[in-house]
Amino acid sequence: MKNRKLKLLDGVAGLILCWALLFAGENIAGSGQGESSHEHQLSIQQQKRQQLQESIARLQEAIAETRRKKDSQASELANAERKISQMIVQLRQLAEQRQQLGQRLQKLQQQQETLQQDVAHIRSRLALLLRSAYMAGRQERLKLFLNQQDPDKLSRLLAYHDYISRARARQLQLLTRDLNTIRSVTEQIKQQQSELDQLHIQYQQQKQNLSLRQQQRKQLLQRLDSQLRQQGEKLNRWQEDARQLAKLLEQLQSALQVLDLPEQKGFLERKGKHTWPLSGKLLKTFGSRKIGNLRWDGVIINAAEGQEVRAIHAGRVAWADWLRGYGLLVIIEHGDGYMSLYGNNQSLFKETGDWVETGEVIAEASGGGRLDQMGVYFGIRYQGKALNPVRWCHR
């Protein structure tokens, strides 16, 4: 691609030269001018050509410098996206911890409700025993012994009095035990709530840091996009000049030449056997024009930020890192020469060498930010050749 751009610049340089010659009032194909006049004009044209060549050389050097800066910024972008990936993994871990603590807190609250019901029941029974003791006159053993003439009745009254006393003592013990348990459970709940609050604070701090990282990434992408737009506008102007002059300068050796790129062909085996890595509209289709004669060798799937990306088939992760043009990229090797590619993610959950199952979450999608891509890049390869994902996946 870099060589193609340089050739394009060289071709346009020749066209600009001819454009200058044409608008200098020269008629290259004409006849009838004097030889001396022609030589004089040729000398002027050569001087203009030299000036244009120097201008083009300076412009090419400026473009080279811009490319070096872009490479440096792309490296910064890669680092920013890796840090965002790490932070999102940490956020997922915090969310799991909060969920576990929430489940524990719910169990403790249910236990507390049960104990409160038990205490209410014990209090009810204790009140009944107290009323029974009151009805019995709350007589002491000695008073009962002195006032009762019938030995059998005296024995029954003493046994009943002992039963009430023992039952009351047992109920008081149970009440004390359950109240202590409630206090302990309450302390546990308070501790769990404190931990949840602390995790929530950490969660918010992580989100703020993530937002800051994302903002930095957007600013970086804006700078990259601005530079690319400036270069594109300059090339577009040159290309427009070339189109305007093409019919008049067909016989000139410096006419613009465009390199043809071979078109990738799809592979039709196992058509419709896989599920798409995520749901979303296809923004870019396989084989559609990308830029110039370059065509898409995969598809771009519209995705919401943080949307889960899943493996379409089981296999081993062959690559999980940042790659220029694809952002954070996962490549899964499925055997027999087949591979699937998932690019433009904001976080990767697998590492090189990991085994994944069909439908397993491997990454989170970026909501947009990779230059001209506003979704997840998805491609399929067979022995290095690109296949049309539409013929392989179904909705």
Image: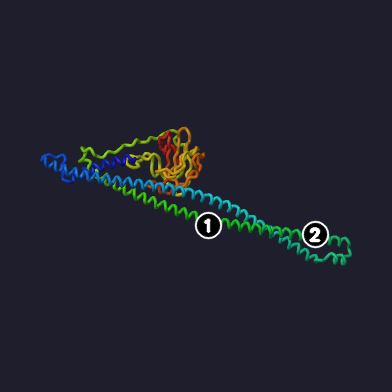
* Image location (x, y in percent) of residue 104: 60, 53
> Which residue is painted at 58% across and 51% down in the image?
100
* Image location (x, y in percent) of residue 343: 43, 43
Front position among marks 1 and 2 = 1
Distance CA(mark 1)–CA(mark 2): 57 Å
Tell me which corner region of the image, top left, top right, bottom left or bottom right, holds residue 292: top left
Does residue 104 appear left or right of residue 387 in this picture? Answer: right
- Please name the amino acid that badge 2 sits on: Tyr
Residue marked by disc 1: 201
Q: How many residues crowd around disc 1 within 10 Å: few (fewer than 14), some, or many (20 or more)?
A: few
> Which residue is painted at 42% across and 43% down in the image?
323
Q: Is residue 101 above or below residue 137?
A: above
Mark number displayed over residue 163: 2
* Mark nearer the N terminus (1 vs 2): 2
Q: Which of 248 and 47 is in front in this view?
A: 47
Q: Which of 391 and 137 is in front in this view?
A: 391
Tell me which corner region of the image, top left, top right, bottom left or bottom right, holds residue 383: top left
Q: Quadrant of the N terminus?
A: top left
Q: How many residues crowd around disc 2 within 10 Å: few (fewer than 14), some, or many (20 or more)?
A: few
* Disc 1 element: helix
* Image location (x, y in percent) of residue 341: 44, 40
Q: In this view, does 216 lie above or below 384?
A: below
Mark number displayed over residue 40: none
